[in-house]
Image (spheres, rainbow, N blue to C red):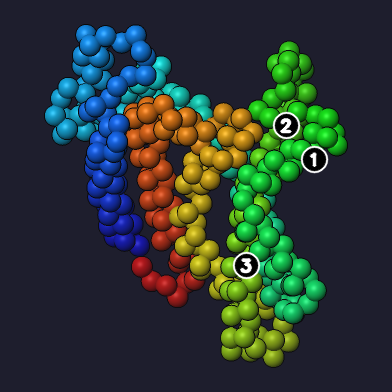
Amino acid sequence: MFSFTVRSFFQKLVTLFFISIISFLVVYLAPGKPSQIDPLNPKFTPEDLVRYRKEFNLDKPLHVQYYLYYRNLFSGQLKSWKDNQPVMGKIRERVKNSLWLFLVGTLITWSLSFPVGISAALRRGSFFDRFSTFIAYVLISIPGFFFAYILIELVVRAFNVPVIGMYTFGMAQADTIYQVMDRIWHMVLPSILMALGGIALLSRYVRAQMLEIIHEDYIRTARAKGLSSDVVYYKHGFRNALLPFVTMFGLILPGLIGGSVIIESIFAWPGIGRMAFDAILARDYPVILTINFISAVLVLAGTFISDLLYMVVDPRIRL
């Protein structure tokens, strides 16, 4: 176990190193690359442009730029090209905002997907199974931004309350309890929309896995012993059906960034996804590279934890 953990950890570090090189080269070679940066300020003179390139190390060789970028990143000295503010400070503040949506959306997804998927599998062919399948296909087929605009329209017309942003204008002067309630209200629609697609996909995976598991010999043996249906399906069957979802765990963590771009943009939620989108439009390469690096770290961390969870879910697996 210890040797596997150490070996896997160093493999992830090597992978992260190559990802950092590839992502840096992609940004450098893309149209409008940093080596040919042309600030969007029309008042810039050629002398200003020279000072600009020197300030952000764009006049140095590529390998030196790579070294200086990651040195400044890990030392906290990396500055945004857009406003000359520390990149990690900006990202840290936005991550706090996105974390609430991510946690609530993930909690809703996993809390509803498993009961729906298991019930559909155990009652295969029933009205509930057909209805849940139809709803899942609808949620998968219709884009999230379409649902977002429909919900915004319905909620605003029905309740005449604001739903855009993190808080209602003027609420900063209200009592703490009202500020907390206002923040929770503004989280409801974005969290639900972030969870809808996940519920549709994950419930289908759960149903498929449970349909495969409930026909195994050990399930029939457990039922023949007189065990209750809850023990048979939820203790014996469900645990063995969890293995594919442990693998999916590695894809959950990067959802903190990539899964919230559209929703945060529609609801004007100042999170990390919206920050990444704005950075791309502004060609703020330090922010783009840093967010890409953090996404890679989250993916590798998720897969690393998934590898360790295999033995917990299925003791037959030996690392």
Quadrant location of the C terminus? bottom left
Mark linked to residue 316: none
For residue 97, side relative to residue 281 (left or right): right
Please tell me which residue is depicted at 29% across the width and 60% down the height of the picture. Answer: 3
Please tell me which residue is depicted at 47% across the width and 62% down the height of the picture. Answer: 247
* Distance in Å between CA atoms under marks 1 and 2: 11 Å
Provide the residue designation for mark 2.
163
For residue 173, side relative to residue 307 (left or right): right
Secondary structure under tag 1 reads helix
Instruction: Residue 58: name its quadrant.
Output: top left
* Distance in Å between CA atoms under marks 3 and 2: 31 Å
Kind of residue indicated by mark 1: Leu
Residue 212 spot, x, y in % from top left: 59, 80
Which is closer to the viewer, label 3 or label 2?
Answer: 2
Please tell me which residue is depicted at 29% across the width and 36% down the height of the picture. Answer: 31
Which of the two discs, 1 and 2, labels the residue nearer the N terminus? 1
* Distance in Å between CA atoms under marks 3 and 1: 28 Å
Pick whichever, 21 or 43, lies toward us.
43
Kind of residue indicated by mark 3: Arg
Q: Are marks 1 and 2 in contact (CB under 8 Å)?
A: no
Whether 259 is drawn above or below 84: the answer is below
Q: How would you rate the neighbour count of disc 3 (Cα within 10 Å): few for under 14, some for 14-19, many for 20 or more?
A: many
Mark linked to residue 154: 1
